[in-house]
Amino acid sequence: MLASKPFRRLWISLSLSSLGDWLSLLALVSLAALLTRDQPPLTISAAVGGVIALKLAPWLVLSPLANALAGRVDRRITMVVADLLRAALYVSVPLVGRLDWLLVATFVAECAALFWAPTKEAATPSLVPKRWLGQADQLNLLTTYGSALAAAALFAVVTSTATVLAGLFPPMSIPDADIALYIAALLSLAAAVVVWTLPLAKEHGEQRRAVSLPRALWSGWRGGTVRRLSVGMLGALAAAGAVIGVARLFVPTVGAGNAGFGVLVGAVFTGVVAGVLIGPRVLRDFSRRRLFGLSVGMAGAALLLAGLIPNMVFAAGAVTAVGIGAGLAWATGVTLLDREVADHDRAGAFGFVYAAARVALMGVAAVAAVAAGLVGSYTLPLGELTYDFSGAAAVLLIMAVLTLVLALVCYRRMNREPADVSLAVELWAALRGVPVKRGGDEEATPVPGTFIVVEGGEGAGKSTQVRQLSIWLRDEGFDVVTTREPGATKLGTRLRALLLDKEHTGMSSRAEALLYAADRAEHVNSVIRPALQRGAIVISDRFVDSTLAYQGAGREMAESEIVEINRWATEGLVPHLTVLLDVPAAAGLARHASPTDRIEAEAAEFHERVCQGFRDLAEREPQRYLVLDAQESPEEITRAIQRRIRPILPDPVPDDSEAVTNMIPVIRE
Ligand SMILES: Nc1ncnc2c1ncn2[C@@H]1O[C@H](COP(=O)(O)OP(=O)(O)O)[C@@H](O)[C@H]1O
Ligand SMILES: Cc1cn([C@H]2C[C@H](O)[C@@H](COP(=O)(O)OP(=O)(O)O)O2)c(=O)[nH]c1=O
């Protein structure tokens, strides 16, 4: 994607701009604390909370206006002016050196960012090919958050270097936060220069309208579907927000300064990014419903430790864990949301969570800062010792308790039905990185690849869907192997001929079952396992379930025996997901021109039993099946499968990002 020169430029400009924005947030918060350092604690925390609140306020108040204007003004000029204005404001703050101007400048700079965001949003489609748009939006989102991490690191380095230099050469000393603001100004300036070189005509390319933050909040909330999930996601983010809000007030209580502030904020974001990116991959086989409550709980527990033990190094570690919990909860919540929300609610639902995430993170940060001042600091005598209890720590503790309660509620709500595996077993398996043995009857050996099976009766549309899926997945850049049963191997073609030849009508059911199993054994051994071993996605048209349905239900053979034979034949290979295309037997048969093979030629009741057999299998193990009505349109079915598959892929990329990402930059831009 970055090979496209215009998009690369837009991305570089976005990176510089976000880096400057985050750096300025850290510097402005620090300066607000410094300018009020001789005042009572409540004033300090109000100043810190004020800066954060003013970075959120424009989004709540002015974003409808910004979106309306974004379509009318020349894009390049909007972006350049916004960047230049920000640069000028950043420089002015240390020069003026007054709290009131600092607050005004914060607000105005954020307004500039607010106008910048929808313009960048609208510009992206004109700079990347349409099929890359989803990835481009993902990259933009990642950059926006990744740059928070980089900015925090930069801030810590700049402030500690400035402190050392000031110690060595006292005459040259410039307050460290001032230097950070000058650097932020330079970054914005550089962003402006890069944007200036972009071919961003006003009407050029496709138009994308951004949804304003209040509107996204309102319509998503009213839509209702998202409330249940989003409370957990937002609660975990709020825990991270509380850390950001009190971090600047917390560092003096553990003897650290601005550099420590940078470290804490950096730690939270490192955690969040790690949680979002790595968590779902490491915990791939872990039940998402359980993971959700557990990650919220992790954020809460880590917050509790951070609040209880006043030590800088310890706090940095604990706060990273808060971030990981929040990031995991976010990623898991998005996956579950994606699975549970109906298509037509999708844009609204995602718009809501992205908008609400911004409010949760920044709003809670602002409130937490002020609350820390309201609580104040105490020293508790403990016999000979004393325990210093700061307002910042108190806020972290309160937030921790709230988050833990929320985690419990989420966990309970999501896991009402008794699970087939206990939590301890699942946790232990996840820690060792092996799949869980569900129901204790599978001797599955873990494979790096992903195994997806499409099942269904005659004419259900299996080959059609397998074809569509492979096109989609290859397009997304995956190594995909499509295959089918019976007859995918050299030996298999012969077995297939034997099995389907009408000459063999009346073949004994046991011979039939064994021949299908023989075909399968060869198939697994020479096609499926090798592909899975190298990490490919294997999509098979039919697998063990076909024998269970056709020979088990259809020929009325004992299921347990068929299971046993096939476990032996496949060495316990179980698909990660089975898509069942459910079609009434008659409707499926009618799709084929005329009964061609020995099995298709069976009586209608036989096919009825087969279809029912498939349904029964799926009902017993709902977490491993996706059952779809095969009478929907093929496109509709493909979309439903894509939605379900995406979370289990090694590298998930949402396909509906166009609708969704209108709102992505809502969190930070
Ligand atoms: N969702 C659908 N609705 C209507 N017809 C379909 C659908 N999916 C596939 N078909 C048609 O049904 C026939 C059988 O589809 P196919 O994919 O070969 O099924 P299978 O592999 O399950 O036997 C084909 O002619 C195909 O075009
Ligand atoms: C894999 C498998 C297929 N079959 C039957 C179902 C099909 O009628 C036949 C051939 O499968 P298939 O080639 O999938 O036929 P179609 O695409 O026309 O549905 O084999 C079984 O009876 N048991 C099995 O285990």
Image: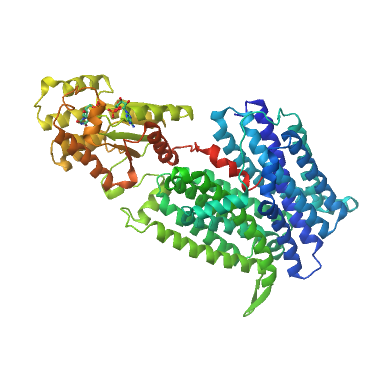
How many marks overall? Answer: 0
Q: Which of 434 and 9 is in front in this view?
A: 9
Q: Residue at x 75, y 53 (%)?
A: 107
Judge from the rendering whether residue 343 lies leftward or rightward of residue 321; answer left or right. Answer: left
Could you say where residue 570 lies in the image, as x and y percent from the top left? 26, 34
Judge from the rendering whether residue 137 lies leftward or rightward of residue 523; answer left or right. Answer: right
The picture quadrant where one finds residue 661 is: top right
Q: Assign ligand 1 to one image quadrant.
A: top left
Judge from the rendering whether residue 325 lies leftward or rightward of residue 528; answer left or right. Answer: right
Could you say where residue 629 lies in the image, as x and y percent from the top left? 32, 39
Could you say where residue 132 lies in the image, as x and y percent from the top left? 56, 30
Quadrant for the N terminus in the image: top right
- The answer to whether any part of residue 292 appears in the image is yes
Q: Which of 349 and 96 is in front in this view?
A: 349
The picture quadrant where one finds residue 409 is: bottom left
Q: Nearer the viewer, residue 560 or 656?
A: 656
Q: Which residue is drawn at 12% across and 32% down?
A: 510
Q: Which of 575 and 463 is in front in this view?
A: 463
Judge from the rendering whether residue 455 lies leftward or rightward of residue 330; answer left or right. Answer: left
- In the rendered image, the vertical position of residue 452 relative to residue 284, given as above or below: above
Color encoding of the figure: rainbow
- The answer to whether any part of residue 530 appears in the image is no
- In the rendered image, the vertical position of residue 92 relative to residue 508, given as above or below: below
Residue lying at the far bottom of the rendered structure:
383
Could you say where residue 442 lies in the image, as x and y percent from the top left? 27, 44
Quadrant for the C terminus in the image: top right
